Amino acid sequence: MADLLVPETHRDLFTGTTIMLSTVNSDGSIQTTAVWSLLGEDGVLRTSLSKNRQKYKNLLANPTATVFALAADNPFRSLEIRATASIEDDSDKSFLTSLLASYGLTLEQFGAPGLEPRVAVTFDATRVRPSG
């Protein structure tokens, strides 16, 4: 499984930046949204989603996801992660608080989105494709 983690060479693409998360809509079309993420020291990628958003509903119905990160200074350097999403309730907002801290924010600074019911999503990689 070690080869299905974010490689050291590309971990900076997930540090304090916005990444793209694609999920499958009920009609089979793709929905892509910019999200923040938290890359654990274990090389596993996670994000926080509101239960009020379509992205969460899509993952409940079909946990297939693709995460894509692109280097701001080099359009040929990127990382794609194809994954199955695991969803855990974050009712105490502990994961959201950790994620926000990695972006230099507190739950209070995050405002209204932080008041919504939240889940923590872990991306269990089935394929990791670095380039550049």
Image (tube, rainbow, N blue to C red):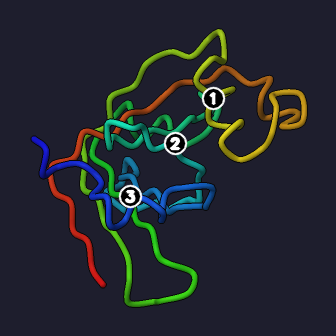
> Circle 2 sits on which residue?
38
Q: Is residue 25 left or right of residue 126?
A: right
Q: Crowdedness of circle 1 by 10 Å Cα count: few (<14), some, many (20+)?
A: some
Residue at image point 74% right, 24% down: 116
**Which residue corresponds to the image point at 65% horizontal and 42% vertical from the top-left?**
102
Report the side of 132 relative to 126 (left or right): right
The percent coordinates of residue 46 (x first, y second) are 44, 38
- Measuring 48% from the left and 65% from the top, which residue is drawn there? 13
- Residue type at the position of mark 2: Leu
Q: CA distance from mark 1 to mark 2?
A: 8 Å
Give left or right: position of 92 versus 130.
right
Classify mark 3: residues with Cα within 10 Å, few (<14), some (14-19) or many (20+).
many
Disc 3 marks a residue whose amino acid type is Val
Residue at mark 2 to residue at mark 3: CA–CA distance: 12 Å
SS at circle 2: strand
Q: Considering only vertical position in the picture, is 72 above or below 127?
A: below
Look at mark 3 in the image and give the residue it sits on. 67
- Amino acid under disc 1: Ser
Q: Are marks 1 and 2 in contact (CB under 8 Å)?
A: yes
